[in-house]
């Protein structure tokens, strides 16, 4: 049966404007039309009355980890445990309004299994874009094989040295069903003994892996804090830069010129700093998070003014950055000074473009999937209202009302 959603306020995300008293028509899981109430004929439709709500496209978390649950330290679990955690986390994400997420790396391709289960209707969760295992350098971020005795095999990541191994790892990521590659370009916050500012995978390794993704028309993403790693990644043709917390002006200019997407994940560093050592996080990790986040707000505004494509992502699953409450990122982006009209496009249309899915999701327009959420308040008056999504529809099916 055709559905008609009456929208008190409608933010289509095609621009930064809000329309009043609009009706969205839905059939077979897709949006067929968007009309004013005056011109809309809702006979023969199941009517969903959201005339007291602010309606917008389903939210997209452009960077998260479905299998991690916000534990204070990276603890290795079996793939079975990870998958069960992922099932629970992904349902929380959907209920918080995320109808699409990009998983930025799991331990053993659990994300690919979770995606298949969601697509088959076995479990509830968002549409997923998966990375499988990340690709890292020996001793790099996500090389979790600390004791020498286990310094072999691809434990939690494809651990590589050299362009040939980078190519091989990227091919395996696709062979085992992931949608994109995740590279580790610099040291990280939650890894031990490495430097967030220092490059890890070399330019040759990045280029070799990125070529595999680009040749297939697939997305490539890279964990990068330091500016040199960011520049290497852009020269190598990587499409999306994650975190970027230690960027410099030259890296900002390069992102603007090349159209490289930046996913700032403010909450990831902030949750570690705010909870700190007292909450059980290792002092090294807390110190690195504080160092990384120090200039992040200022840099983000520089990026915005230069026209960098800033996306919306959270790294949900990292310490005290829980699935279902990662919507706190809305406030942090507003605190940085980004306009609400932009932030709401970042979490929808800009993210859809970053995922190369702009023909399917990201705006409320005819032809797109009926991924639609609503909040009771008006985010333009109070961004915190984005933390309380009260209506969730994915592919025309209502999951929360
Ligand atoms: Zn991440």
Image: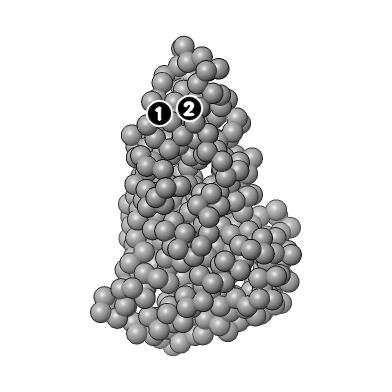
- Secondary structure of the residue carrying numbered label 1: strand
- Secondary structure of the residue carrying numbered label 2: strand
Looking at the image, which residue is at 70% across and 53% down?
A: 217
Looking at the image, which residue is at 59% across and 33% down?
A: 365
Among the two numbered marks 2 and 1 on one chain, the one whose residue lies closer to the N terminus: 2
Q: Residue furthest front?
A: 381
Q: Which residue is mark 1?
A: 51
110, 366: nearer the viewer? 366
Looking at the image, which residue is at 52% across and 65% down?
A: 264
Q: Is residue 285 left or right of residue 370?
A: left
Q: Are marks 2 and 1 in contact (CB under 8 Å)?
A: yes
On the image, the x and y values in percent for residue 394 come to 45, 37
Mark 1 lies within 8 Å of ligand 1 (Cβ measured): no
Looking at the image, which residue is at 37% across and 48% down?
A: 385
69, 81: nearer the viewer? 69
Residue 269 vs 213, above or below: the answer is: below
On the image, the x and y values in percent for residue 162 come to 66, 79
Corner quadrant of residue 67: bottom left
Q: Is residue 205 left or right of residue 6?
A: right
Q: Is residue 353 visible?
A: yes
361, 49: nearer the viewer? 49
On the image, the x and y values in percent for residue 197 come to 56, 83
Which quadrant of the rendered structure holds the C terminus?
top left
Residue 116 vs 320, above or below: the answer is: above
Q: Which residue is mark 2?
A: 21
Question: Gap between marks 2 and 1, in whole Å?
Answer: 7 Å
């Amino acid at each position: 049966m055709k559905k008609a959603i009456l929208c008190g306020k409608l933010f289509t995300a095609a621009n930064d404007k809000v329309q009043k008293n609009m009706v969205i028509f839905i059939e077979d899981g897709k949006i067929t039309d968007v009309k004013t109430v005056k011109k809309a004929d809702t006979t023969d439709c199941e009517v969903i009355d959201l005339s007291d709500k602010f309606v917008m496209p389903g939210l997209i978390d452009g960077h998260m980890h479905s299998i991690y649950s916000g534990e204070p330290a990276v603890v290795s679990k079996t793939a079975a445990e990870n998958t069960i955690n992922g099932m629970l986390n992904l349902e929380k994400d959907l209920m918080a309004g995320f109808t699409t997420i990009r998983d930025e790396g799991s331990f053993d391709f659990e994300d690919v299994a979770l995606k298949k289960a969601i697509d088959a209707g076995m479990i509830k969760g968002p549409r997923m874009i998966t990375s499988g295992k990340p690709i890292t350098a020996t001793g790099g971020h996500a090389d979790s094989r600390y004791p020498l005795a286990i310094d072999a095999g691809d434990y939690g990541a494809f651990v590589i040295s050299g362009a040939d191994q980078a190519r091989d790892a990227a091919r395996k990521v696709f062979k085992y069903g992931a949608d994109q590659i995740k590279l580790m370009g610099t040291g990280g916050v939650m890894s031990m003994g490495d430097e967030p500012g220092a490059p890890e995978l070399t330019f040759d390794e990045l280029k070799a892996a990125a070529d595999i993704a680009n040749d297939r028309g697939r997305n490539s993403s890279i964990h990068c804090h330091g500016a040199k790693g960011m520049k290497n990644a852009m020269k190598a043709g990587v499409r999306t830069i994650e975190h970027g917390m230690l960027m410099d002006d030259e890296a900002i200019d390069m992102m603007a010129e090349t159209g490289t997407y930046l996913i700032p994940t403010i909450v990831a560093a902030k949750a570690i700093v705010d909870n700190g050592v007292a909450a059980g996080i290792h002092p090294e990790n807390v110190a690195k998070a504080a160092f990384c986040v120090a200039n992040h707000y200022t840099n983000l505004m520089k990026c915005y003014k230069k026209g960098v494509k800033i996306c919306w992502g959270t790294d949900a699953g990292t310490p005290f950055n829980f699935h279902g409450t990662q919507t706190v990122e809305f406030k942090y982006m507003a605190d940085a000074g980004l306009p609400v009209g932009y932030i709401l496009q970042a979490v929808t249309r800009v993210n859809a473009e970053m995922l190369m899915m702009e023909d399917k999701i990201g705006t409320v327009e005819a032809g797109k999937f009926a991924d639609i959420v609503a909040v009771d308040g008006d985010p333009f008056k109070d961004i915190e209202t984005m933390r309380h999504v009260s209506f969730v529809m994915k592919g025309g099916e209502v999951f929360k009302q």
